[in-house]
Amino acid sequence: MENYDLIVIGAGAAGLAAGIYGVRSGLNTLVLEEKLAGGTTADAPWVENYPGFQSINGTELAQKMVAHAKNTGVKINEFERVVKMDLKGENKVVETERGSYETKAVIIACGSYYRQLGIRGEKEFRGRGVSYCGLCDGPFFKGKRVLVVGGGNSALITALYLAHIGSEVKVALRRDVFRAEEALVQALRDTKNIEVFMSSEIKEIKGDKMVKKVIVLDRKNGETKELTVDGVFVQVGEAPNSQQAREAGVAVDEDNYIMTDGLQHTNLAGVYAAGDVTNHPVKQIGTAVGQGITAAVEAYAFIRRPYYKK
């Protein structure tokens, strides 16, 4: 069993920031990531609200963060999924598909996953016209008809990106107002090749080998209509990857987000959480980075017991 001072679970913005500060504090630090390092930051077509970058491609920003962490000396194990954790003892054990690790402190920063609509046709056509990542799959729909489902920041960013690359874009949202930042709403209104359907609910996705149509319910008058589309981009929010933490005894709220205090402490000593997996109400790259830094500083204080923590 390998031993580390600090193990960070997740290599998104929060996890990478925690890893950097862990190493800079002198902690032997390991970051475990079940996919590629970079997290959902890499899924953003562009980022315009992260200080220092007026506008930057999400993949590029994620790559810069990963490179920074590696150059600092952070060990990142990609494609290594955590399957079980024992977090209640003084020495914590993290088990993965490859092996087991012992550590003095753990920072849970495993982010979230894309919510699904849960409608007929969604699962059947995933990868055949149904997508959850505009940057990943958008180029396949250049010059084609697409529907973006959702009214938050992610939905509008995806719609604007698709319109920019030449897609004919429709946006459908259940509410009669957007939840996105006003700057994005205004940009949407200023873009000619985007049509918006307010108070609309997608009831079914239809097709043969690929997506062909969607059935849309007008929530105000109860009428349904059929829209011809080549792709559906689902952008209706995210849910936390907290299952392993919950099973290990970490407290979560009613929506399964890990509960933390202002210093990223969970209910278990030596266990911290940061980023989109927590119950912090603001889910942004900047807040994730700040939480990751705070968690690492607190983990250092827990392990080393500096004078200001005694």
Image (cartoon, grey):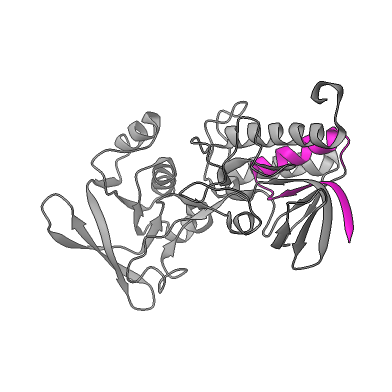
**Quadrant of the image occupied by residue 156:** top left
Name the residue rendered at 80%, 25% in the picture.
309
Q: Check residue 152 for magenta coloring.
A: no
Please state the horizontal and vertical placement of residue 224, each as a whole percent of the image.
16, 61
> 93 or 119: which is nearer to us?
93
Please state the horizontal and vertical placement of residue 145, each as a whole percent of the image.
33, 58
**Quadrant of the image occupied by residue 24:** top right
- Report the number of discs: 0
104 left or right, relative to 9:
right
Name the residue rendered at 70%, 62% in the picture.
84
> 55 or 257: which is nearer to us?
257
Please state the horizontal and vertical placement of residue 159, each as a whole percent of the image.
39, 47
Name the residue rendered at 64%, 34% in the picture.
291
62 lies above or below 85: above
The quadrant in which the N terminus is found is bottom right
The quadrant in which the C terminus is found is top right
56 left or right, relative to 173:
right
115 left or right, relative to 263:
left
Q: Check residue 23 for magenta coloring.
A: yes
> 229 or 73: which is nearer to us?
73
Please state the horizontal and vertical placement of residue 82, each as a whole percent of the image.
70, 61
Name the residue rendered at 50%, 35% in the picture.
282
Which residue appears farthest toward the bottom when viewing the image? 208
139 left or right, relative to 15:
left
Q: Give the range drawn in magenta.
A: 1-27
